[in-house]
Structure formats: structure tokens, C-alpha cells
Amino acid sequence: MSEDDGKVVRARSFARAGFLGNPSDGYFGKTISFSFTEFRVDLRLTESARLRFAPGEVDDATFDSPAQLVRDLRLYGYYGGIRMLKAVAKLFFEYCEEHDLQVPPVNFTAEYKINIPRLVGLSGSSAICSAMLKGLMEFYGVEIPLEEQPTLIMCAERDELGIACGLQDRVAQIYNGLTFMDFDRQLVESTGHGRYERLDPTRVPPLYIAYDPRRAEESGKAHRKVRRLFQQRDSNVVAAMSEFADIAQQGRDALVSGDFSKIPALVNANFDLRDRIFNVAEENRRMVMTARSAGASAKFAGSGGAIVGTYSDDDQYAALSAALEKIGCRTLRPKIAMKSDESAALAGAASWRSS
């Protein structure tokens, strides 16, 4: 069946950067995150005779050596992106059944493209999942409340696939823009979601993101020990998560009031706190310290491999980029993604084929 023979739906999700407060999102804390347009997942659902999930770039089945095979399977698992498409589809159909939402008896072929750097903390896997959920809602004409969508995506990754994750990434990719998130424990445990507030993305100091494409690392590894200690109510970890949340709250208040002068110190404090309680790899720490040596603020954008921070002017950005390039990092000035940026995914079949 060609595109002209049936329904075609396109959806898009963007990479995200955890700006302040992470990793407290998995520990009933508070965070500020933003999605940005430079990296994305494009998904297409085409009406077809049977349900089919087409392999994408993270579904490699060809390897240069046994060593590459072992490394890729350790990092990406056996099913790549297809397992994520399947998991979201399963929970979507179960959600519809549980909520008596009628789904038309139509099948689809799911295809995706991704240019988000792999496993450097920019949320490529959740971008695949969130694009799939957006596509399914559009394809079947189903509306799921906005605040519930990130939770469904998280459950697909965490419960179906065993991926250690929190709500932050999925909230950023569903809400877009710049979002303050309060994962108040009582609220999360009673409703399944946090309290999400969209902030004005034009009221931020100049931002940069840098990443090391060689630093692919499974993000759940960084959290397992700390999560265990948190569950055991270790006083240092519990206090640290409260402090992360306070950093995010202070950042939210500063952004709302326009007091940008406080933001760089909060960014730096966020990383310094993380460095005290996590086993931060020296290569990741070097990225942060290199950026700071150029006068910029710096912290992890996720769990390592990418950093985010602020800079003062073009000269400082040039110095920052040059310093990071010397250690193998790529630097960019992100454009914060808005809901309107997703509409580019609907440009038509020609753009899909040529992109």
C-alpha cells in the first residue's frame, strides 16, 4: 500500500537538556528542562494491511567486529528503537481499552528517523517513545490528557523495557519549550504525574550545549547505586535530592523575576552537588571543568556525555567552543523547541524522503 492509498500521520519529538535540578526528577524533586530543535526524532505512521515496525538507525544488525557487536548490545540492547515503538503501542492500546476509548480497526506501519547523538544524555530513547505516542494519538484520533502522556511513556520504558528513568525527559518532550516540574511525592503517588509549569523560553540567559560523541554510556548505570541508597533513606542522598530541588526552585523564581545573574551559580552548584554523590567519570568531569575554564557555567544535560550551561557573550562562546573542541566535544547554541516546531513534521512525503 502506498501513501496515496491510506492515512499517513507524522510526528516529531526533540532532544532535551536538563537545565536545573536533575537528577532529582526520579526522587520526587524539582527540575527545569527544555527541548531544542537541533536534534530530533521524526516518525511516520502509514496505514497498512498489517501492523509493522520498520527498523531505524538504532536497530543496527551489521557490525565491524565482535567487539563492536558486544559494545552495541551492552549499550543499546537487542531490539534498538523497535522495542520502544512496540512498548508505547502496547500501553497506548491498553490505555484506550481501560478508558473505553474507541480505536478504529486500522493497522499501520511505523517508521522513524533519529539524529539525536546516541547515549550522551540528550534523551534519544524517550524522543522515540514520545514521537510514537503523539503519532498514535493523531492516527487513531485519541486524546490523552497532556499531564498523563509523559507517565504513559515512562511506564513503557520503565515497566515494559526495564529502562531506569524518571518523568523529566518525557515531560520536556511532550510539553516542549522550557518547563518547570515539581514531582511532589504526594501528588505523584496519588495522580501518577507531577505539577508542570511552562516558563517563558525568551526569558533565559544565553545557553549552550556541548557533547562528546565518544561518550556513549547507558544512563541507568549512574542511578542504580544512588537509587538504592535513596530507597534506604541514606541521609546524604536524601539531603542532596532536596538540595537539587531547591536549586531548581531558585532557578524558576529567578527566571520568572528576570534575575538572570543568579543562574550561572545555580548551574555550577547543580553539578558540584552531583559530583559529591555520584561516581562521575573523569572524562565527563573534564567537559564541565573545560567549559568553566572559559568562564561559562556548566553541568550535565543528563547523565553524562553532554553538558549544558550559560555564557556571557559571543567572545566567551567562541572561547568555550574552542576549548571544548580540543577535548573532542561539539558545541551548539540551542534553539528551544516550541509546539509550532513540531508542525514541520507534517510538511509532506517529499520532506520525509529527502530528509
Image: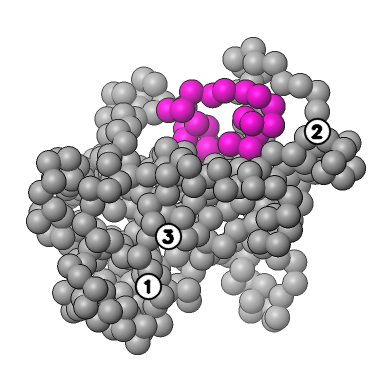
In the image, 296 versus 277, the foreground residue is 296
Q: Pointer 2: what residue? A: 107
Q: Which residue is mark 1?
A: 331
Of 119 and 308, the residue lying toward us: 308
Task: State the image quarter where residue 57 is shown.
Answer: bottom right
Cα distance between the residues tagged 2 and 1 = 41 Å
Q: Amino acid at mark 3?
A: Gly
Left of 126 or right of it: where is 181? left
Q: Earlier in the sequence, mark 3 or mark 2?
A: 2
Residue density around tag 2, few if under 14, some if 14–19, many if 20 or more, within 10 Å: some
- Reply yes or no: does residue 348 show up in magenta: no
Judged by depth in the image, the label closer to the viewer, 3 or 1, is: 1
Of 221 and 111, the residue lying toward us: 111
Residue at 64%, 12% in the rendered image: 100
| CA distance for labels 3 and 1 | 14 Å
Q: Is residue 152 visible?
A: yes
SS at circle 3: loop
The x, y position of residue 313, in whole percent, is 20, 70
In the picture, the disc for residue 121 is 3
Q: Which residues make up the magenta segment? A: 134-155
Query: Which one is in front, 208 or 19?
Result: 208
Measured from the top left, where is residue 158 in percent x and y?
51, 41
Q: Residue furthest bottom?
A: 326
- Provide the secondary structure element on which disc 1 rests: strand
Where, quadrant-wise, is the C terminus in this rendering?
bottom right
